[in-house]
Amino acid sequence: MTPVLESPVAARAGARATYAAFIANGFAFASWAARIPQVRDQLELSASELGLLLLAIAAGSLVALPLAGIIVARLGSRRTVTAMAVVNGLALSLVAVGQVYGLLPVVIGLIAFGFATGAWDVAMNVQGALVERRLGRAIMPRFHAGFSIGTVTAAVLGAGMVALDISVVTHLLIVAGLVVVVVPLAVRGFISDADSSEAPKPTTGTQRTLAAWREPRTLLVGLFVLAFAFAEGTGNDWTTIAFIDSYGTSATVGTLGFAVFLTAMTVGRWFGPGLLDRYGRVPVVRGLAGVSLLGVLLFVFGGSTPLAFVGAVLWGAGLSLGFPVGMSAGADEPEMASARVSVIASIAYTAFLGGPPLIGFLGEESSVLRAMTAVAVLLAVAILIAGAIRPPVSAPADPAAD
């Protein structure tokens, strides 16, 4: 990765703002995920019905994601994140209040929540790729560690809220207020997309985004990241349910199991850049995918709560680098970085949000726990196609490449 030396102060400020965006995005999403069991019970949903409810988030994201690259090209990363944070908070408020009254307001709220989360995710990844190139070193996994820090914080807070018997309404309204107020202030330090020499004019951004959807390597990297996103989304939405329903734990222990999964992923993302610099992308991420696959199988077939906790640790740690390294792979060639990152993020988020409902449908036929074997299948595919994340010959030298 070739260092870009101009505006080092702005680059560092951009890095701090990007961390804030990732942390807040993870905090908002996991705050919802931590209260899924209580929402399910309030609405009296079966596994398949809960899967359909979760599909509402995917539906919102499916609308947002194909448009996200174009939106970012026109509005810029900062404005996009700011706008989507406000929509995210309002949607979470609707979910919080609506679940008391029935299913319809929750569905509407989750569609809006999915739209905002997906567009926000693409914008912050585009900004992260820009900051990474400005700093001239691999930092994307640590931005994603920020996302995981947000999810861990939300999961632990959620466990506390459950243990203290604080209502879903109170909990999620507090989170929504924080998101709406804090995020627009935090992202003021973003680097302007127009400051980058490769930043396109709006029409060029549209053309580049459409062109990126036709590139075989970009689509293959997207498929690679899709496997990790599916595994992460399944872990986020279903580990708590699996602990409670299949292993017979209390709601508090189930939520702590979710927190353990997220903590392992956070630790892997924070320390992962050292492994990438030393051994290269492909061997590190391929090896970690194998660790995650083993963890999923142990979680599903271990047969006891302690082994399920061990499986959750391996599952989360092994997932840690797949998504962020895929984002970096999309940014290997600066002139197409924004377009490719938006495409890869779009594909990944489709699985991140659409995969968990699939687990719900499969779980209705057997059990949620057995349905999670689908995660292992996709991780096996990721191991086979990991070579796609190797930088193209024309890309600048990258210390994290093999």
Image (spheres, rainbow, N blue to C red):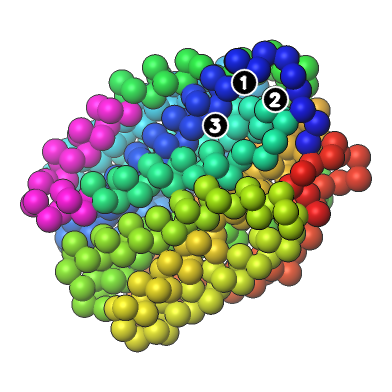
Q: Which secondary structure type mostly characterizes the magenta part of the structure? A: helix
- Residue 253 in view of the camera: yes
Observer-nearest of 376 and 140: 140
- Residue 27 x, y percent position in the rendering: 35, 40
Please tell me in which quadrant of the rendered image residue 244 appears: bottom left
* Mark 2 and mark 3: Cα distance apart in space: 15 Å
* Mark 1 and mark 3: Cα distance apart in space: 14 Å
- Verify CB contact (< 8 Å) between mark 2 and mark 1: yes
> What residue type is disc 2 on?
Arg
Mark 3: secondary structure:
helix
Observer-nearest of 341 and 87: 341
Q: Residue 134 carries which label?
A: 2
First of labels 2, 1 by sequence position: 1
Q: What stretch is highlighted in magenta?
A: 158-179
Total tally of numbered discs in the picture: 3
Q: Residue placed at 55% from the left, 51% from the top?
A: 271
Observer-nearest of 91 and 394: 394
Which residue in the protein does label 1 denote? 11
Please tell me in which quadrant of the rendered image residue 252 appears: bottom left
> What residue type is disc 1 on?
Ala
Q: Return the residue found at the far left.
A: 165
First of labels 1, 3 by sequence position: 1
- Residue 240 x, y percent position in the rendering: 30, 64
Mark 1: secondary structure:
helix
- Residue 222 x, y percent position in the rendering: 68, 51
Q: Nearer the viewer, mark 2 or mark 3?
A: 2
- Verify CB contact (< 8 Å) between mark 1 and mark 3: no
Q: Name above or below for residue 284 compared with residue 58.
A: below
* Mark 2 and mark 1: Cα distance apart in space: 6 Å
Which residue in the protein does label 3 denote? 124
Q: Residue placed at 23% from the left, 49% from the top?
A: 158
Density class for disc 2 (Cα within 10 Å; few <14, some 14-19, many ≥20) is many
